[in-house]
C-alpha cells in the first residue's frame, strides 16, 4: 500500500517506509454521493526512530515559514482509531482514493410497505381450453351442474407477470438496520380458476335449468309449481335432491361455486399467514456493498435483486436439474387445498363432507332462502 498525502500533487509526501500496521481513518458520512478524500496516517512529529522522515521535515518547514496547511473538509485526519464500518473504496490513479457513500439512510422507509397477497381470478368453462364441466361429469353419476376448478398449471403463466423487479418496493428500516420489502401489487390474482354452471350436463341428464324462478311458467309453461319448490329445497343438500326431469336453480348453483371460491381464498389467506409471511420475514438484507451471498445492499435496486430471488423461491418453489428441492407457496397451497377438500366438517353438530360444508355457507343458504320467499310471494305452496 502506498499512501500519499498529496498536496498540490507533490509526490514528495509518500510514506515509502511507513511501519506496519498502518492505521488510517476515512470519512464515514458524506454529503455527496461520492467524494474524493485524503487519507492520512497518524504519525509522530520530529525524530522518529532516530531519523527524520520527509513528512515531518516538510511540516517543520511549513511551520517555520508561517504557511498553514490547507484547511478543507478533506483535511488530513490523524486518529488513533480505525473506522470499522463498510465503505467502497476504489483506486483512482496513483494518489486518490474514491470513497462512496455506503449509507442506506437516504432510503429510509416513510411509507407503508405492502405485503404480497394472493387471490384468484375466475373464468367461464372452456377458457384456456379447460373443460372441467365435461371432465368432472365423466367421473360422476350425479349431474355436475356447476364447477369450481383451480388451474394449477396456469401459475407458470401468472408467475412470469408477477415476478418483475418493477413490481417490488424496498426501503431501509434504520430501527432494525435492514431493508424492508413489499410489492406494488398487494392483491394479485396469481391463481386462475374455472367457475361456471354446466348447462350441457344439466340438459344431458334430463334436467331443466332456471336463471329465474319466473321461467317455470314463462319458459317451461309448467303448472306444477309446488314440485319446483321442492326441487329448490332439495338444493340444500349436495348432490341436490331434485326429482328426475326437475329444475336446477342456476343462481343456487353459482352461489355454491362462489362459496368454493371463498373457501379457496380462506385456504390461501391461512397459508399466507402460516407460511408465506413468516418465511419472507426470515430474509435479512443489511446495509452494505451489494453482496448477494452475504445479503447486503446499499440501494433499493440492489436490495430488490436479493429479495426478488428469495421471493421467487418462496412463492414458486425451487427445482434443481428437474428435481423439486423446495416447495414454495404454490406447491404447499395445492397440497393444502386438496387436504382441506378431503376433510370432514362439523355443521349443526353433524359431520359433513366438504361439498355439504360448502352448501351450508351463508352465500348458498341465503340464496335459497331468498328464492323460497319469492315462491311464497308468487305461489302458495306448502
Ligand atoms: Zn361443489
Image (spheres, rainbow, N blue to C red):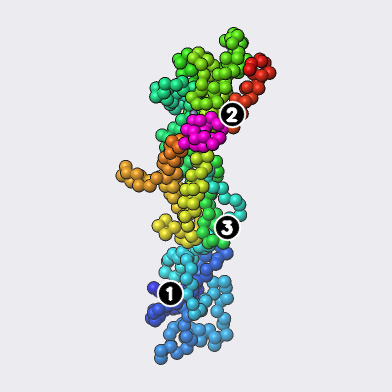
Q: On the image, which quarter does residue 228 sit in? A: top right
Identify the residue position indicated by label 1 in the image.
3
Residue drawn where x is 49% and y is 53% of the image: 281
Query: Disc 2 and disc 1: Cα gap in Å?
Result: 82 Å
Percent position (x, y) of residue 75?
54, 74
Nearer to us in this view, 164 or 278 = 278
Q: Secondary structure at mark 2?
A: helix
Which span is picked out in magenta? 344-361
Q: CA distance from mark 3 to mark 2?
A: 50 Å
Disc sitting over residue 108 in the figure:
3
- On screen, 232 above or below 71? above
What number is the disc on residue 365?
2
Task: For marks 1 and 3, give the one nearer the viewer.
Answer: 3
Nearer the observer, 26 or 279: 279
The percent coordinates of residue 325 (x first, y second) are 35, 47
Q: Residues within 10 Å of mark 3 (few under 14, many from 20)?
A: some
* Label 1, label 3: how far apart the Cα atoms are: 35 Å
User: Residue at 46% across / 43% down in the picture?
Assistant: 163
Q: Nearer the viewer, mark 3 or mark 2?
A: 2
Q: Quadrant of residue 337?
A: top left
Amino acid at each position: 500500500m502506498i499512501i500519499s498525502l498529496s498536496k498540490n500533487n507533490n509526490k514528495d509526501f509518500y510514506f515509502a517506509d511507513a511501519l506496519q500496521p498502518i492505521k488510517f481513518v476515512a470519512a464515514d458520512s458524506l454529503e455527496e454521493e461520492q467524494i474524493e478524500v485524503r487519507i492520512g496516517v497518524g504519525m509522530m512529529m520530529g525524530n522518529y526512530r532516530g531519523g527524520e522522515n520527509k513528512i515531518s521535515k516538510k511540516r517543520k518547514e511549513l511551520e517555520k515559514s508561517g504557511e498553514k496547511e490547507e484547511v478543507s473538509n478533506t483535511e488530513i485526519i490523524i486518529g488513533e482509531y480505525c473506522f470499522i464500518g463498510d465503505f467502497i473504496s476504489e483506486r483512482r490513479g496513483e494518489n486518490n482514493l474514491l470513497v462512496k457513500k455506503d449509507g442506506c439512510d437516504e432510503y429510509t422507509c416513510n411509507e407503508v410497505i405492502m405485503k404480497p397477497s394472493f387471490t384468484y381470478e375466475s373464468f367461464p368453462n372452456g377458457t384456456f381450453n379447460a373443460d372441467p364441466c365435461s371432465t368432472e361429469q365423466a367421473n360422476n353419476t350425479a349431474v355436475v351442474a356447476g364447477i369450481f376448478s383451480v388451474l394449477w398449471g396456469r401459475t407458470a403463466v401468472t408467475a412470469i407477470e408477477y415476478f418483475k423487479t418493477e413490481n417490488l418496493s424496498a426501503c431501509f428500516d434504520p430501527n432494525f438496520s435492514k431493508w424492508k420489502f413489499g410489492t406494488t401489487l398487494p392483491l394479485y390474482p396469481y391463481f386462475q380458476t374455472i367457475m361456471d354452471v354446466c348447462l350441457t350436463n344439466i340438459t344431458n341428464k334430463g334436467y331443466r335449468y332456471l336463471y329465474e324462478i319466473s321461467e317455470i311458467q314463462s319458459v317451461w309453461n309448467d303448472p306444477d309449481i309446488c314440485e319446483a319448490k321442492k326441487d329448490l329445497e332439495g338444493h340444500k343438500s349436495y348432490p341436490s335432491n331434485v326429482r328426475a326431469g326437475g329444475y336446477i336453480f342456476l343462481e343456487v348453483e353459482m352461489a355454491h361455486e362462489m362459496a368454493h371460491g371463498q373457501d379457496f381464498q380462506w385456504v390461501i389467506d391461512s397459508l399466507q399467514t402460516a407460511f408465506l409471511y413468516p418465511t419472507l420475514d426470515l430474509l435479512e438484507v443489511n446495509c452494505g456493498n451489494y453482496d448477494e451471498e452475504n445479503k447486503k445492499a446499499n440501494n433499493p435496486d440492489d436490495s430488490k435483486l436479493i429479495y426478488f430471488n428469495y421471493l421467487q423461491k418462496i412463492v414458486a418453489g425451487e427445482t434443481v436439474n428437474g428435481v423439486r428441492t423446495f416447495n414454495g407457496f404454490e406447491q404447499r397451497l395445492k397440497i393444502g387445498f386438496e387436504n382441506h377438500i378431503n376433510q370432514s366438517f362439523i355443521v349443526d353438530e353433524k359431520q359433513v363432507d366438504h361439498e355439504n360444508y360448502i352448501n351450508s355457507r351463508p352465500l348458498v343458504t341465503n340464496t335459497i332462502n331468498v328464492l323460497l320467499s319469492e315462491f311464497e310471494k308468487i305461489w302458495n305452496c306448502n
